[in-house]
Every structure is written in C-alpha cells, then in structure tokens.
Image (cartoon, rainbow, N blue to C red):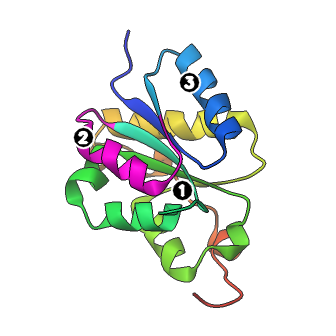
Amino acid sequence: MQPQFDVLIVDDDAAIRETLRALFEDDGYFVREAADGLTALHFLHTVNRPQVVITDYQMPRMDGFGLIGYVALDEDLRTRNRFICLTANAHRISQQFGTTLRNLHVPVINKPFDIEDVINAVDAAAAQLTCPREQFPKHHWREPLPQNQAFSSPHGQ
C-alpha cells in the first residue's frame, strides 16, 4: 500500500539527504530533497500531498527557523504537513524558535542522530497526518525536547 504522504528532506549536507532518501525510499515513500528552506517552500507550495518535512536548523538562504516560522503563519501548510527539526546545535535554538517548535509540536533530533530516532519521529508524524489532531490521543503527539534541554539560548534570542 502506498503511503498517504511524501517525505521532504531539507538539509544543506548532501550526505545526510542521500542517507535519509535511501532509507525512506526503501520503505516505499516518495522522497524529495531540498538544500535550503527556500527550495523546501517551493515544494510545500507546489505539492498537494501531505509531507513529513525533516529539516535542518542551520542552512544557507533560508534556515529551519525561517522555514518553520513561515509555515507557522500559513494555515494550509501548517495543517497539511508535519515537521521534524534536526540540529547539531540545540543549545543555540532561540527562545522564539523554541516556542514555535512547541506550538507546532515539532520534535528536535540532535545530530549526530540515531536513525531509529528519525524513523520513530516520521512514524509519529505519519500518525498525525492520517488521524486529525483532535481525534489523536495527546500523549501520541510529537513532543519537542524539554525546555531546559533544547530551548535555552546564551543570547536570549
């Protein structure tokens, strides 16, 4: 059976994109790649199928903060897709971005990541896409890292 959603991998590191692409294509998903948030926005606006978006935090042109911040303001994109944030610098996530991640129930996965963590996050996102949030038990929603671990910023940004 064909999955009811696609996977969009957004990362400026080609090796990470290729690794995740191979993993999810082997599981039968249609996978798109974007090297930055602007390219990802193009896919989000032109692809009508729901997508699980795995996005890096730091990228050129438009970073994960810009991408997810844009999506937070667009009801169609926000409700049609689910997001997962990858970062090697969770300690540098600004307070504002941390709030956005919590409000959208976006999990943060630290790099280097365990591939099982990414698979589990995509599975949780898939469950949200196939079952409306109001019908899905709250304890199954994707949860970001606890505030004291992921969202402190030495600059208070």
Q: Secondary structure at mark 1?
A: loop
- Crowdedness near tag 3: few (<14), some (14–19) or many (≥20) residues, C-alpha within 10 Å: some
Residue 80 drawn at (x, y percent): 27, 44
- Which region of the structure is painted magenta? 33-50
Q: Is residue 106 above or below residue 15?
A: below
Q: Position of residue 76 (x, y in %)?
A: 21, 52
Q: Residue at x 24, y 61 (%)?
A: 74
Direction front: furthest residue: 61
Give the mark, 1 or 3, whose residue is nearer the N terminus. Answer: 3
Q: Identify the disc placed on residue 143.
A: 1
- Dot placed on the residue nearer the N-terminal end, 1 or 2: 2
- 31 drawn magenta: no
Callout 1–callout 3 Cβ contact below 8 Å: no
In this rendering, the label closer to the viewer, 1 or 3: 3
- Residue 7 sits above or below residue 98 on the image: above
**Which residue corresponds to the image point at 33% horizontal and 24% vertical from the top-left?**
4
In depth, the one of 4 and 142 nearer the eye is: 4
Give the class, few, some or many, for how many residues have Cα within 10 Å of label 2's Cα (few <14, many ≥20): few
Residue type at mark 2? Answer: Thr
State the separation of the CA atoms marked 3 and 2.
Answer: 21 Å
Q: Nearer the viewer, residue 104 or 28?
A: 28
Instruction: Quickly name the residue at label 2.
Output: 46
Gap between marks 1 and 3 measured at Cα: 22 Å
Residue marked by disc 3: 24
